[in-house]
Image (spheres, rainbow, N blue to C red):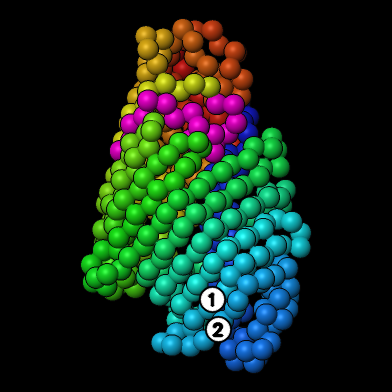
Amino acid sequence: MKKKGVNASKSGAWLKRVGVVFIGLLAGLALIIAVLLVVFDEADYKRALAWSADHFLDSELVISGPLSVGYSEGVLFSADEFQLQAHDGSYALEVSAFNLHLNLASLLSGPLWIHDLALGDFILKINETEDDVDFFIPPVVISRAQVNSLVVEYQEVSPGTLHRFSLDNLIIDDADVDGPLKVQASGVFKGQEFRLDGILPPLGKIQDTTTPKPIKLDFVSEKINASLEGSITDPLNGKGLDLKILASAESVDEYFEIFGDDIPTLGKLNVTAILRGDYETPRLEDIDLHLRRGERVNLAVTGKVADATTGEGAKLQISGESDNPAVLSWLLFKEQNRLSSVSLKAALEINNGRYFISGLD
C-alpha cells in the first residue's frame, strides 16, 4: 500500500537556504569590495557599494556608520550600522559592526579565503519563496571568526512557521595552522539553550583531497546531547564524509519541527548512525533508533536514508508497539488520531515524496 506524503524535499530546505544566503552574501560582498579597490576612490565607497549591491545582489544597501576599505596582506573592510535588504523581500540583513579581512587573490584561484571575520549584533531574516531553488554553496574558508549576538529567522510560506536560531557567541580559531580548527559556540535553538565545542579539519591541509581529516563536535542542550565524530576527505567541496552520530534526548519535539509542523510528542530518543556522502546529499547508514514514552510507546527503527536533508531514499525497518501511536499516525497520514493502537513490523521506503509500506504485520 502507499500513501502520498508532504513533499520531502521541503523538509530540510530552510537549513540549506540559510547557508546559501549567508555564504552567498559573503562571497557577493567580497566581489563588490574587490571592484571598489580597483575602480573607485575612497570618497565614493558608500555610493559605489550601494550601486553594486543594487546591480549585483538586487538589494538595497545602507551604511549609516563609518566605513573603511584598505589593503594589508589582503583586503580589510570595516563598516558600522550595515543594512542590506533584497528588493523582492526575500531577505534582510542588519549588522551593527562588520569587520572582514580576506584574500582577494583567492577569488580568482579557488575558494574564498577569509582570514578574519568579526560580527556584532548580526540579524538575518529570510522569507521563503514558492520558487524552487537550486542550492549551491560556494567554497569559503574562514580562518578566524568572532561573532557576538547572531540571530537567524526563517519564515515559511505555508503553514507559516517561523524558525529562529540565535548565537550568543561564536569563536573559530586557527591558532595552529597545521592543527585542527577549534570551534566554540553557545546560543538558543527552538527555545532551548545549547553549547557547541569541537574541532574541524586543519586549514593547512584543507586543500588536500586524498587523506581523511578529523572532525569532532559535541552538542549539549537542556533536552539533547549529541556528538559527531569522524573525518572528511575533501572539506572544501564537502565530499568524503565518514562520521558517527550519537544522540540522546528526553524530548526533541522542538528540534524535529524543522522537518514538519505539528509533530506529536516523541518521548525519549536514543539514536546512532553513520553519516557519509557529501554536503549536498548526505546519506545515513546503520541507523539504530529507539523511541520510548513510558509504558505506552516502544519503537525501534533501523536502516538507511539516501538523502538525510530530505528523507528521500529511506529504507527503514520498523518494529514496536503502542496504545497511543500518535507519532506513527502522523508519519503515515499527517494526522495524530488515525490509529488507536498498534503492534507492528514493517518496512518503510520514501521515494519522490511518497511513502511505501511493505511486509506489514
Image quarter hosting the N terminus: top right
Instruction: Indicate the quadrant where residue 43 lies.
Output: bottom right
Give the image location of residue 73, x and y in percent.
41, 87
Give the image location of residue 71, x and y in percent.
48, 88
Residue at 46% x, 7% y is: 323
Note whether 70 is above or below 272 in the view shown: below
Note whether 184 is above or below 100 in the view shown: above
Q: Amino acid at mark 1?
A: Ser
Residue 245 in view of the camera = no
Instruction: Indicate the quadrant where residue 245 lies.
Output: top left
Residue at 71% x, 76% y is: 50
Q: Which residues are magenta?
A: 245-263
Residue sitting nearer the eye, 83 or 329 = 83
Residue at 55% x, 58% y is: 122
Instruction: Indicate the quadrant where residue 260 lies.
Output: top right
Residue positioned most to the front: 65
The residue under label 2 is 69
Q: Earlier in the sequence, mark 2 or mark 1?
A: 2
Mark 1, Cα crowd under 10 Å, few <14 / some 14-19 / many 20+, is: some
The residue under label 1 is 78
For residue 257: magenta?
yes
**Residues at discs 2 and 1 in contact (Cβ within 8 Å):** yes
Give the image location of residue 255, x and y in percent.
48, 35
Give the image location of residue 113, x and y in percent.
43, 75
Note whether 358 is above or below 23 in the view shown: above
Query: Could you say whether the residue bearing mark 1 is in a helix, strand or loop?
Result: strand
Residue sitting nearer the eye, 244 or 192 = 192
Image quarter hosting the C terminus: top left
Q: Amino acid at mark 2?
A: Val
